[in-house]
Image (cartoon, rainbow, N blue to C red):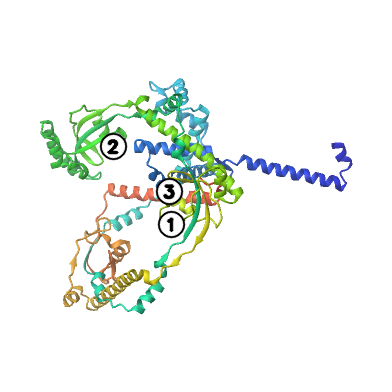
């Protein structure tokens, strides 16, 4: 064959044959490429994210949430938090960081990985790294040393990149002082509040004005876009009825997830808290310590602990309940608090315990030791989960087949009939309503349906009670609601808007007159208006009646001075307008070192977060990131 090709290499027939061979191989290569990435759901640079990789991260997130919720996670919580999207974005971010690490030359070395593993306490016996313990614990978690070490390599690499990028953030002394004075400088004002509600009765309403208002604000009085959707649902509950996990399956699940059924040691306790700020001077700390010591002596002499908590505790959340904290694990409290509480026996009272919140007196009420629930106690829970998992797998396979057949037939109803799946009657939906017959219709699913073109078939949709494939049958564009049907609402809206305009006009007139006379008090007296006086307030500690003033209003007030005591225009306060005059300003004193450190830390964290987010955004913009499949 090769001799034939060489001899006839100049002939057109051979050239055509060669091109056909090339085309076949290119096509075959493309086919192999497509097949290779058929199960991938996303791409980050040169890395393709497989469904199994996504599933592993997703399951870890779900497991973490289960621990937080102490068992199963409510469906509405799962949907509202969009855990699937969180899992995918965490994977994308991971590979962006790894790409950045490669560009920066910050990959973890083998020596760094080794040192990190040697330092992990759970792999140690009598203070030394134990190889047998290391390999045994990994086997229990179905992991090989190679896989674990690669994970550690990635973890260290991520930490190095974060340290490098965040390290660019620097805080200057001038920034600290500026923030200190911005937060703590004080002002005092006199002001008059003009409430628009007082003007609603003065609004004259003409039919022609209502019609004009209705036309000018047409967007307020529209029926939303509606879409007619046909769908076929594969219900998980029906599938679960035919699934019966065996004893071996239940036992295997229990063994693989025994950590889930193991509860940590917990303590139920009461406490009395005497608050002390972390930056309080020593004299104040000692004064509070002495007060706490007196109450501690009363408690140890047998005084009713609950009554002492109600009388003295400064923990607003527990004082009324006699200091009751309920059960908690050691990780749920400050280390010093946990250390003292877990060292007590039921009925015992601790000495004074110092935490960042102040001084605590702790009384132990009950101790629940760590416990692993036997399989008999959790068998029902495991069986339900196995049935749900199996039903989900079956439903996904059926939904995949339904989707593919619907694409081929270009009609979800025809595909459903061929597969003997019940199809719904077409239903009209809009973004504001629940889907009839399906219970609450998740917002993210509605968003997908509203992206479809007419006649287009959706991917698999995960609904509260199963999986579905939908098709957009028709679209009804937003339509104006006839004036007659919304006349009362138009009238109410018109009155509110006009009353607001009258109130703002009145406030503007009062402000102009006050500026002219350089006196708010005189103008208010002449017009029989009530002038209020604020206390000194700052941005950090606003006046109790001016809390709703907002950033713009506060900035306006703090820009005032002796030569310009009035703002340029009335300020808005909780749907009212206020005319104010600066009475006095008071600069905060010099910050203590502790206050400087606190402000510096806050600014540094903000800058580090901003620098890190900017770096990730830059990496994303310069890396090919795309979602290949819906999840």
- Sequence-first tag of 2 and 3: 2
- Image coordinates for residue 53, horizontal then vertical, percent: 52, 38
In this orientation, which residue lies closer to the viewer: 451 or 228?
228
Mark 2 crowdedness (10 Å alpha carbons): few <14, some 14-19, many ≥20:
few
Residue at horizontal 54%, vertical 49%?
413
Name above or below for residue 286 compared with residue 623: above
Q: Which quadrant is home to the N terminus?
A: top right
* 410 relative position to 154: left or right: right
Residue at horizontal 48%, vertical 27%?
142
For mark 3, give the secondary structure: loop
Mark 3 crowdedness (10 Å alpha carbons): few <14, some 14-19, many ≥20:
few
- Sequence-first tag of 1 and 2: 2
Q: Is residue 278 visible?
A: yes
Instruction: Point out which mark residue 431 bears.
Output: 1
Q: Are marks 1 and 2 in contact (CB under 8 Å)?
A: no
For mark 1, give the secondary structure: loop
In this orientation, which residue lies closer to the viewer: 412 or 443?
412
- Image coordinates for residue 497, horizontal then vertical, percent: 32, 71
Instruction: Point out which mark residue 438 bears.
Output: 3
Q: Quadrant of residue 62?
A: top left
- Image coordinates for residue 47, horizontal then vertical, percent: 57, 42
Residue at horizontal 45%, vertical 35%?
240
Q: Nearer the viewer, mark 3 or mark 1?
A: 3
- Tell me the distance, in whole angstroms, between the alpha carbons under discs 3 and 1: 15 Å
Q: Quadrant of residue 491?
A: bottom left
Instruction: Point out which mark residue 334 bears.
Output: 2
């Amino acid at each position: 064959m090769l001799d034939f090709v060489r001899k006839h290499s100049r002939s057109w027939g051979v050239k055509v044959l060669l091109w056909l061979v090339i085309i076949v191989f290119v096509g075959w290569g493309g086919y192999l490429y497509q097949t290779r990435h058929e199960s991938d759901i996303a791409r980050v640079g040169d890395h393709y994210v497989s469904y199994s990789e996504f599933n592993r991260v997703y399951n870890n997130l779900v497991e973490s949430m289960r621990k937080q919720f102490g068992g199963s996670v409510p469906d509405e919580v799962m949907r509202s938090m969009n855990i699937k999207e969180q899992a995918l974005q965490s994977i994308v971010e991971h590979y962006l960081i790894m790409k950045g690490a490669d560009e920066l030359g910050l990959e973890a070395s083998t020596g760094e990985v080794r040192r990190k593993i040697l330092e992990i306490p759970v792999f140690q016996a009598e203070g030394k790294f134990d190889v047998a313990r290391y390999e045994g614990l990994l086997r229990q978690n179905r992991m090989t040393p190679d896989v674990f070490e690669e994970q550690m390599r990635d973890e260290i690499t991520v930490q190095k990149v974060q340290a490098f990028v965040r390290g660019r953030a620097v805080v200057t002394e001038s920034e600290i002082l500026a923030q200190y004075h911005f937060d703590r400088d004080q002002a005092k004002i006199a002001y008059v509040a003009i409430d628009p509600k007082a003007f609603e009765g003065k609004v004259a309403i003409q039919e022609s004005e209502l019609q004009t208002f209705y036309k000018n604000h047409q967007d307020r009085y529209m029926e939303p876009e509606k879409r007619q959707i046909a769908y076929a649902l594969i219900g998980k509950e029906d599938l679960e009825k035919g699934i019966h996990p065996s004893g071996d399956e239940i036992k295997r699940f229990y063994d693989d997830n025994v950590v889930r059924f193991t509860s940590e040691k917990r303590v139920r306790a009461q406490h009395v808290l005497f608050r002390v700020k972390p930056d309080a001077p020593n004299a104040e700390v000692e004064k509070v310590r002495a007060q706490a010591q007196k109450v501690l002596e009363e408690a140890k002499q047998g005084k009713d602990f609950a009554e002492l908590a109600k009388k003295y505790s400064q923990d607003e959340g527990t004082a009324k309940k006699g200091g009751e904290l309920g059960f908690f694990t050691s990780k749920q409290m400050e280390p010093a608090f946990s250390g003292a509480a877990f060292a007590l026996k039921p009925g015992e009272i601790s000495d004074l315990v110092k935490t960042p919140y102040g001084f605590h007196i702790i009384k132990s009420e009950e101790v629940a030791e760590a416990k692993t629930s036997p399989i008999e106690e959790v068998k029902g829970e495991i069986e339900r989960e196995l049935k749900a998992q199996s039903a989900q797998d079956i439903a996904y396979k059926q939904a995949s087949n339904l989707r593919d057949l619907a694409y081929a037939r270009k009609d979800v109803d025809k595909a459903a009939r061929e597969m003997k799946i019940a199809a719904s009657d077409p239903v009209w939906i809009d973004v504001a309503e629940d889907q009839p017959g399906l219970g609450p219709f998740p917002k993210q699913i509605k968003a997908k349906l509203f992206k479809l073109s007419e006649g287009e078939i959706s991917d698999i949709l995960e609904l509260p009670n199963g999986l579905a494939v939908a098709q957009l049958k028709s679209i009804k564009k937003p339509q104006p609601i006839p004036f007659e049907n919304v006349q009362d609402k138009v009238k109410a809206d018109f009155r509110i808007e006009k009353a607001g305009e009258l109130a703002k006009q009145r406030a503007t007139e009062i402000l102009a007159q006050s500026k002219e006379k350089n006196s708010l008090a005189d103008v208010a007296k002449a017009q029989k208006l009530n002038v209020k006086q604020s206390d000194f307030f700052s941005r950090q500690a606003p006046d109790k009646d001016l809390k709703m003033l907002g950033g713009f209003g506060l900035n306006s007030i703090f820009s005032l001075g002796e030569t310009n005591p009035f703002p340029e225009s009335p300020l808005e306060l909780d749907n009212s307008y206020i005319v104010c005059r600066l009475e006095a300003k008071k600069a905060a004193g010099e910050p203590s070192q502790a206050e400087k450190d606190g402000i510096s830390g806050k600014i540094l964290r903000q800058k580090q977060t901003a620098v890190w987010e900017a770096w990730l955004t830059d990496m994303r913009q310069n890396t090919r990131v795309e979602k290949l499949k819906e999840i």
